Image: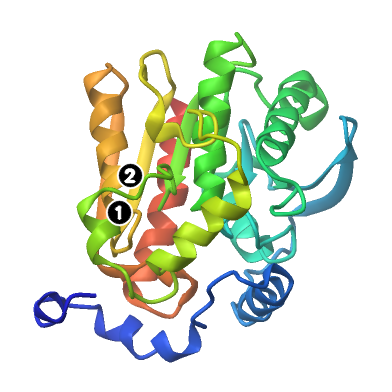
Amino acid sequence: MDPELMRTVAMDPELEAFIPLFPRADLTDPVAERKNLAELAAAVPAPDTAGMEIKDRTLPADPDVAVRIYRPHRAQGAVVWLHGGGFVMGDLDTEHPWATRVADGCGAVVISVGYRRAPEDRFPAALNDAYAALTWTAEHAAELGVDPGRIAVGGHSAGANLAAAVALRARDQQGPPIRFQLLNQPQLDDRQETWSARNFTDVPWMTRDKVTASWRHYLGSTPASPYAAPARAADLSGLPSAYIATAEFDPNRDEAIGYALRLLQAGVPVELHQWPGTFHGSQAIVSAEISQRQIAELAAALRRGLAE
């Protein structure tokens, strides 16, 4: 980050103390970084799951898709939930604490998707898995005990990218209706031309080099399309209502804000929340007051979106 800019930033003091615990991953070794993320996720306290039914399942697709289904009491809607990790890291286990919080907080059945990861499986593998999970959820709404008209998609970071791409694909292909999309700190634009992408080059956890590497792993030599990088979509009309949250010190911040504005201009209802003093992934520091507010707001946004 530019030294002059460094003198003006104001990181949340509760978060700042934990920054040394976030590794400076650069994604040059995906296997090693998956292990690092798993260790970091294991340190995040998981909520009490007593009274919540949790079941692993394999959905028939080509290839089959692993999911973990979280069913709280009296759930009416469903959320197809997609983990973060730069398209490279993350799995059902690393996402377990967050999927549990989402299900408990929003009162919906959560289908957490163990999609294929890059670079072993590049675009569109992860998107195909996410879309297969959406299709299965809609077709099995009665089995899940949910209203098929109350299905949301959501996720963190690369998972938020996939949620946005699933919404685009469902619109374009007349797929299952999506009631709501929740995009938390989404990674949407491979071009990295925004102010935040150019200036937040060395902020905690999500550096510019890491963003660049994640796109390289995900796309390979394939040119980016709107389904890979939703910020490239020319037409955002007809998409489901959205809640978009951004972190202040995140290279991806401005592309997410720009996407929210373009959704609004296309007539899509949007709630945008920019969290001051935070960085990409900082809500993993669940002891911080601002993280607790972020987590509660994500759940509340899903409750509102599914109830509309």
**Residue 152 is drawn in which quadrant?**
top right
Residue 280 visible here: no
Which secondary structure, mark 1? helix
* For the residues bearing labels 2 and 1, Cβ distance under 8 angstroms: yes
Residue 165 lies, in percent from the top left, at: 53, 31
Residue at position x 44%, y 43% from top?
A: 183
Residue occupying the far top of the picture? 174
Residue 21 left/right relative to 110: left
Nearer to me, 51 or 12: 12
Up-down relation of residue 56 to residue 251 (above or below): above
Mark 2: amino acid: Ala
What residue sits 50% from the left and 45% below the top?
160
* Local secondary structure at mark 2: helix
For the residue pair 266 and 272, the one nearer the viewer reads as 266
Q: Give the residue type that dot 1 points to.
A: Arg
- Whether residue 24 appears in this view of the structure is yes
Q: Mark 2 points at which residue?
A: 256
* Mark 2 residue crowding within 10 angstroms, few (<14) / some (14–19) / many (20+): many
Q: How far apart are marks 2 and 1 (CA)?
A: 5 Å
* Residue in the picture at 80% in, 53% down: 54
Q: Indicate the position of residue 88 as horizontal and vertical percent values.
A: 65, 58
- The answer to whether 212 appears left or right of 268 in the picture is right
The residue that appears at 67% across and 81% down in the rendered structure is 39
Against 104, is 139 above or below? above
Q: In which quarter of the image is the N terminus?
A: bottom left
* Mark 1 burial class by Cα count in 10 Å: few <14, some 14-19, many 20+: many
Q: Residue 97 carries which label?
A: none
Residue 178 position in % (x across, y down)? 55, 22
Q: Is residue 236 above or below residue 70?
A: above
Residue underneath mark 1? 253
Residue placed most toward the observer, 131 or 303: 131
From the viewer's perspective, tell me whether residue 262 is left or right of residue 210: left
